[in-house]
Image: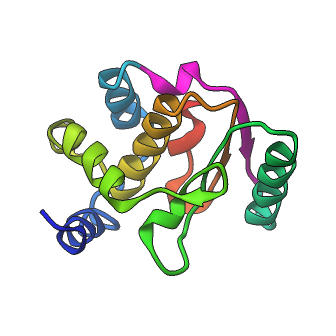
Amino acid sequence: MDYKTFLDTIYQRHSSNVKLGLERMEAILERMDSPHEKLYGLHIAGTNGKGSVAAMCEAMALAHDRTTGMNTSPHLVDFCERFRINGVNIDYQKLLQIYFEWQKDFDETEASFFEISTAMAFNIFHREKLDHRDLRGRTGRQIGRNQSI
């Protein structure tokens, strides 16, 4: 599967598969050995300014030689923008590798677009052994998915 096919695949799950509750998210994270429980960082939520606050927190941590991960949504140009390690977007090859590793679990749990991207962020951040990670929360239809932290 190439990058475009990957994007087409996960985008198809965007609006047709939203279910309230944390059951699917918790099931996915449990299958991943609960990476969200092994991370330290900030969960930034609210109506406005989440991206700016996350960027400032990332910059402050990097200025003090800390390792950082940041997960935001939506992205502006490319899906990889959602996953930043030490101020740099994740490489799409690494993103595809992680997706393929967990694709069976995403399919079995009928994970939504947001559940997939959130679970992948937790997994990426745990693998990178980061000092801090910033998770920018969302409100509205997707409420609760990143509340697993």
Residue lying furthest front: 65
Residue 19 visible in this rendered orientation of the protein: no
Magenta span contains residue 44: yes
Which residue is drawn at the image coordinates 16% and 44% (left, top)? Answer: 107
Bounds of the magenta span?
34-45
* Residue 90 visible here: yes
Residue at x 82% of width, y 43% of height: 61
Q: Is residue 73 above or below residue 30?
A: below
Query: Where's residue 111, x and y in %?
Result: 28, 46
Relative to 9, 94 lies left or right: right
Report whether 79 appears left or right of 27.
right
x and y percent of residue 98 in the render? 30, 43
User: Could you tell whether 1 is left or right of 117 in the image?
Assistant: left
| Closer to the camera in the image, 36 or 94 | 94
* Rendering colour mode: rainbow
Along the line of sight, the residue nearer the viewer: 103 or 110? 103
Residue 33, picture quadrant: top left
Snapshot quadrant of residue 46: bottom right
Q: Residue 97: x, y in percent?
A: 26, 47
The N terminus lies in which quarter of the figure? Answer: bottom left
Is residue 39 on the magenta stretch?
Answer: yes
* In this picture, residue 56 sits left or right of residue 13: right
- Depth order, front residue of 54/68: 68
Closer to the camera, 14 or 41?
41
Which residue lies at the image location 69% right of the left edge and 38% below the top edge? Answer: 67
Indicate the position of residue 138 as horizontal and vertical percent values. 62, 57
* Residue 78, quarter of the rendered image: bottom left
